[in-house]
Amino acid sequence: MSHENLELNKIEPANEFMTKPIRGLQTKLIILTIIFVMIAEVLAFVPSVANTRLRWLNGVLDTAAAASVVVDGQEYMPLPEKIQTEALMATGTKRIVLRKDGASRIVASVDMPPEISNHYNLSETGPVQAIVDAFDTLIFGGDRVIRVTDQVADNRDMQIELVLNDTQLRNSMLIYSRNVLFISLVIAAITAGLLFFSLNRLMIQPIRRLTQSMQQFSEQPEDATRIIKPDNGDDELWLAEQHLSAMQTQLHSTLRQQRRLADLGLAVSKINHDMRNILTSAQLISDRLALVDDPMVKRFAPKLLNSIDRAVSYSSHVMSYGQAQEPKPKRRLVQLHVIADELGDALAGDIQDDDIEYVNEVPANLEIEADHEQIFRVIHNLSRNAVQALKADDEAAVVKRVCVGAVSEDHAVRIFVDDTGPGMPAKAKEHLFKPFRGSARAGGTGLGLAIAKELIEAHGGTITLTDKSSTGTRFEIVIPMQA
């Protein structure tokens, strides 16, 4: 195992994001606020400018109607020129006509222009038409002569008609529009300021704090001081800080654990060669000792061989887990009963001197779609753990048994590995299938269960620890059939 394979990839900050120009949320918020306020003001301005135009025309009509009442009911006779001029100047019109009972009477008039551009009957003008007429005056008015007609007060039989130039009307509407624009800008500025100061405190600053924490943590995730410390709160941003803090804490712990694993793998890779030479020499010596015709030597030689085998297995497990990836399983139909028999042979050296019974309860004709070597490794790891737990149990009256069984289900095979040992400690259950943390015995690595889980998941299956009503431990493995 090379040192390069054990190096961890550091979390590099996204420099391409850092160099990209950032537009502050405050600026966007202010611009959007002003835009939305102006849109609201425009929506309010459209009917209001139409009402302004109607009020101005109604005011002129009311003045003309008041002047016309003087001549109403009198015999028809032309008014003196001075009175006509005063009436026209008071209303700003070119002609005032009073219509009653189908008859028309010119109250006052000057020389008429050759053409009248538009005729407006205010009594028949609806809201939509009033808006259209108002924008027509704003855009195209200013030098046009228009005719305006409306009924006098509530008298439907009497109408007043004016002919006038729309210059003053348009100027009045432009002044109103300017005032509305100024007021709208002031309202938008005040609203934007209030929103800015409130949202900046409630949202922008917490979001900026989250962003800075993520950036600083990504630069050096192994530094625990860069984990965000959530403020007090009860909103979504506070919840986001809580989740970010939990994620950073978990990632920090994972990186530390991976660093330790990398250092451990590097150390094992350095001593592996020498360890193999030492163990090979020890095996040769122990083999020669087994040939010595001495009862004491024959008694202890097998135990020495088992100890050496355990040392080799320990080193092999560490080296195997340090590999980047297990090979993809080559699934074929295999006899699970035969694999269980092979397992019994492999465990014979461990159980023969400790009164441990191995039972193969797998049906003789049960077939499973699995990788022969990998499924053997899984069951062997679980069985060796069971044997070691039974060896550690010093109670002589206890029945020591390891049992491997299986049943066929719909599109799956369920495998059981049972023992009659003292059971799994609570601490080991909390860290089950975690390397270097899920061992049930002192000095264990927990790699056997971690490797077993990895191999079973590669088959698309599951491995679980099930609760038993009696003492002991039971693992269940489910291997689905291929489609």
Image (cartoon, helix red, strand yellow):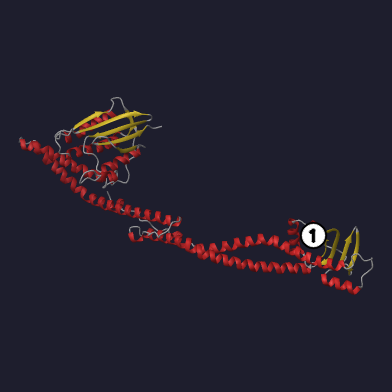
Between 379 and 234, the one lying in front of the other is: 234
Three-letter code for the amino acid on which mark 1 is drawn? Leu
- Whether residue 431 appears in this view of the structure is no
Snapshot quadrant of residue 419 = top left
Query: Can residue 40 be seen from the camera position used here?
Result: yes
Q: In this figure, which residue is indicated by the disc labeled 1?
A: 122
Q: Quadrant of the C terminus?
A: top left
For this rendering, which residue is in front, 303 or 167? 167
Please tell me how crowded label 1 is: few (under 14), some (14-19), or many (20+) other residues with Cα within 10 Å.
some
Residue 229 shown left or right of residue 122 in the figure: left
Q: Residue furthest top?
A: 365
Above or below for 324 versus 73: above
77 sits to left or right of 370 = right
Taking depth in this image into account, of 195 and 132 the one nearest to the observer is 195
In this picture, is 64 found above or below 247? below
Residue 329 x/y as whole percent: 34, 37
In screen coordinates, is 186 left or right of 336? right
Q: Secondary structure at mark 1?
A: helix
User: Residue 55: where, in percent of width, then height?
Assistant: 75, 64
**Image check: 141 left or right of 23?**
right
Identified at 74% across, 69% down, the residue is 172
* Outermost residue, bottom side: 82
Say which of 316 and 89 sits in front.
89
Residue 18: percent from the left, percent from the top?
A: 45, 61
The residue located at (88%, 63%) in the rendering is: 98
Q: Position of residue 175 (x, y in %)?
A: 71, 69
Total labels drawn: 1
